[in-house]
Amino acid sequence: EELGVDALLQVMLDCELFVFEILQDENLSNPAREAREILLRNFHVIQKRHPQEFPHRFESNLEDSSDDNHSSSLGRSAPSDDMSVASDYQEEGAPELFEEIPLVAAQDLSNILKQGYVEKKRRDHSFFSMEWQKRWCVLNNTIFYYFGSEKDKQQKGSFYINGYSAELVPSLRKDSKKNSCFELSAPGRRSYQFTASSPHEAREWVDQINFVLKGTSDYANYYQCLWDCEADGPDELAFQRGDVIYILSKEYNIHGWWIGELDGAIGIVPKEFLHPAYIL
């Protein structure tokens, strides 16, 4: 009997997932849209009456559904990328932690240390949803954002990486992508699993995240390059826009030059081409 109850609960969850997340991307007729809203409100009532048996996803989905009707003009991700709008927000845990990070459009972020498409593992996938979903991820100083696409007007989720560690974890998958998997984990906090486009790309994510996590004591000496710069002499350091240079000395500051290091090479760099890589 207990197994039957669990199975019924799972069917209810799957039905709610279908009604909210699958149908929201369909071009429904007015009667069908009204029927969908009625079903969502019924799910909401069930959640209110039986909070222990049913998670709060029913309530958040009802609110998100209403929001979608007013924000669709802002642009949406492709259906395959947008299957877990509500559950992505729910996954963040305590709402107050999420609210500390303001909503922002992907294209409005600055001080980007690493960005690109990766597959993010969902915590609550079911028959109607995929375990891995494509996300546009951005490492912005010590904040990790993930969006449905690089054109999204606000993140699906975000969290501070302080206290986390990143490592390659091939055991996350058993298919050909297993060597492209990495994980962010921290004691007592939610873990995040991702699959990059290649093993090399996964290593870059891990290295960049751990580089940021090494500590803030030396961050003031790291500067990000604003533009490309070719070396006009043997004592100058060539770099490209987006490179992060470690400043060894500001001895020639009066002349507009600093001494920096990039990929093991040392040379002078024009300070006007640089700005702090980290917000301290």
Image: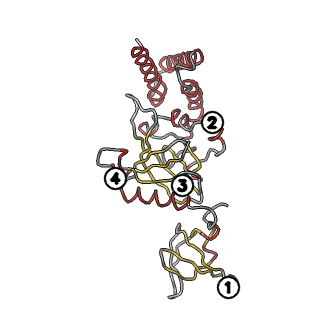
Farthest residue in the bottom direction? 234
Pointer 2: what residue? 95
Q: Residues within 10 Å of mark 4 (few under 14, many from 20)?
A: many
Residue type, label 1: His
Q: Secondary structure at mark 2?
A: helix
Nearest to the observer: residue 219 or residue 70: 219
Pointer 1: what residue? 255
Nearest to the observer: residue 160 or residue 270: 160
Q: Secondary structure at mark 4?
A: helix
Residue type, label 3: Leu
Residue type, label 2: Pro
Task: Name the residue located 40 percent from the left edge and 29 percent from the top edge.
Answer: 126
Q: Secondary structure at mark 3?
A: strand
Pointer 3: what residue? 139
Q: Are marks 3 and 2 in contact (CB under 8 Å)?
A: no
Per the model, the C-alpha gap separating discs 1 and 2 is 50 Å
Q: Residues within 10 Å of mark 2 (few under 14, many from 20)?
A: few
246 vs 199: above or below = below
- The picture places residue 243, in percent across and down from the top left corner, at 52, 69
Q: Quadrant of residue 69?
A: top right
Per the model, the C-alpha gap separating discs 3 and 1 is 34 Å
**Mark 4 or 3 closer to N-term?**
3
Pointer 4: what residue? 179
Q: Nearer the viewer, mark 1 or mark 4?
A: 4
